[in-house]
Amino acid sequence: MPLKIRLARAGSKKRPYYHVVIADARSPRDGRFIESIGSWNPLLPKDGERVKVDADRVKHWLGA
């Protein structure tokens, strides 16, 4: 089963919010996922607040 780290869109129209997820490469963008490892909110003003990712889980899924 090929896996990808991808962004799953959430939020409402013209107010996007994304979840950073581990999902099967063949599943749809907002479909089933294996694990949520973070979030990205492009509407927040500061870069430090926009992205929140669990680095340990990313390393686990990348095999490092």
Image (cartoon, helix red, strand yellow):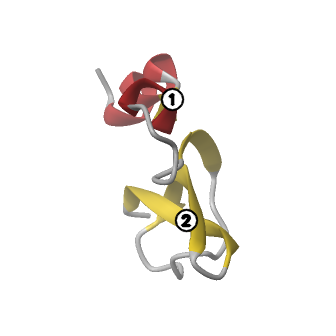
Q: Quadrant of residue 37?
A: top right
Q: Residue at x 63, y 46 (%)?
A: 35
Q: Position of residue 7 (x, y in %)?
A: 46, 60
Marks 1 & 2, CB-CB < 8 Å contact: no
Q: Position of residue 17 (x, y in %)?
A: 59, 59
Amino acid carrying label 1: it is: Glu
- Disc 1 crowd, CA 10 A, few/some/many (<14, 14-19, 20+): few
Q: Quadrant of residue 63?
A: top left
- Dot 2 falls on a residue whose secondary structure is strand
Q: Position of residue 1 (x, y in %)?
A: 44, 64
Task: Report the disc number at residue 35.
Answer: none
Q: Earlier in the sequence, mark 1 or mark 2?
A: 2
Q: Residue at x 45, y 39 (%)?
A: 45
Q: Using the numbered discs, state the Cα–Cα distance from disc 1 to disc 2 in whole angstroms.
A: 18 Å
* Left or right of 43 on screen, residue 15: right
Q: Which residue is mark 2?
A: 8
Instruction: Please tell me whether residue 63 is drawn above or below residue 32 in the rendered image.
Output: above
**Quarter of the figure that contains the C terminus:** top left
Amino acid carrying label 2: it is: Ala
Instruction: Please tell me whether residue 21 is drawn above or below residue 29 in the rendered image.
Output: above
Instruction: Please tell me whether residue 9 is drawn above or below residue 38 in the rendered image.
Output: below
**Nearest to the observer: residue 60 or residue 13:** 13
Q: Residue at x 57, y 78 (%)?
A: 14
Q: Which residue is mark 1?
A: 49
- Dot 1 falls on a residue whose secondary structure is helix
- Disc 2 crowd, CA 10 A, few/some/many (<14, 14-19, 20+): many
* Left or right of 8 on screen, residue 7: left
Q: Residue at x 53, y 49 (%)?
A: 41
* Left or right of 55 on screen, residue 16: right
Q: Quadrant of residue 39?
A: top right
Nearer mark to the viewer, of 1 and 2:
1
**Nearest to the observer: residue 9 or residue 31:** 9
